[in-house]
Amino acid sequence: MNLAIRFSGDEKRIVVPYSGRHLNPAVEWYKLGNPVWMAFRAACNEILRHCVLPSGFKNSCYRLLGVKIGKDVIIGPLVFIDPLFSELITIEDGAIIGGDVFISAHEFLANETHIGKVCIRKKAVVGIRCTIRSGVTIGRNSIVGICSYIGKDIGNNEFWGGVPARLIRRLEHE
C-alpha cells in the first residue's frame, strides 16, 4: 500500500515511523509512492546529471519530473536531485547550484523515514560538492561554500560553510 505524502501549511519535514519486518525502512522504499514513477525519475535524473552545460532544456526536464524551478536557474553538472520526492524541491529565480551537489528530500533512518521540503530561495548560490538535507531552506541572496553540509535553515543574505555548515558572516546586498 502506497502512502500519500501531503504537507499542509508551513510544515517542512514529516516523520514516517517504520515497524515492518525488515531491519530498516529503506528496504521498502517502493511503499512511499509509485515505484514505477520513482524509478523513471531516477533514470531521468541520472541522464540530466551528466548534462555538462546548464541550460533551459535541463531545467524544463527537471520541471517535468516535479522539481519547482524558477527562471534563470543554473544547475551544474553531476547535481543529484532526489528522485523519490523531487516534487518537494523548489529552486527559485536566479539560484545557482554548483556541480556535484546532493539535494535530498528524504532520509532513511533505522526506525523511521524523514521526508521534507527543500527550498533554495531567489539568487542563492550553493557551492560545488555540497549536501543539502531534507527540510532545509537556503535564504535569498545567501551563499554556501564548497563541500558544505547544510543540515539546518540558512537565513537571507548569509554566507555559510563547513561540515556541518555554520554562519561565517552576514552579507550586504542592495
Image (tube, rainbow, N blue to C red):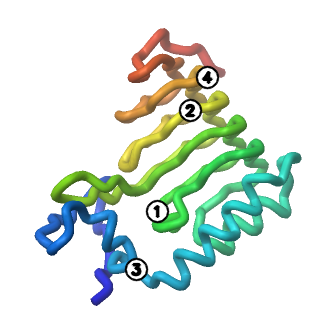
What amino acid does circle 2 point to? Cys
Residue 131 as seen in the image, left or right of residue 5: right
- Neighbor class of circle 2 (other Cα within 10 Å; few <14, some 14-19, many 20+) is many
Residue 33: mark:
3
Check contact, mark 1 vs mark 3: CB within 8 A. Answer: no
Q: Which residue is mark 4?
A: 146
- Work out how far the residue at label 1 is from the one at label 3, CA to CA, in angstroms: 13 Å
| Sooner in the amino-acid sequence: mark 3 or mark 4 | 3
Check contact, mark 4 vs mark 2: CB within 8 A. Answer: yes
Which quadrant would residue 126 be assigned to in this image?
A: top right
x and y, in percent, of residue 74 in the image: 76, 44
x and y, in percent, of residue 158 in the image: 50, 21
| Sooner in the amino-acid sequence: mark 2 or mark 1 | 1
Q: 104 or 140, which is in the foreground?
A: 104
Which quadrant, please, contains the C terminus? top right
- Work out how far the residue at label 3 is from the one at label 2, CA to CA, in angstroms: 27 Å
Q: At x 34% / y 53%, what residue is drawn?
A: 107
Check contact, mark 2 vs mark 1: CB within 8 A. Answer: no
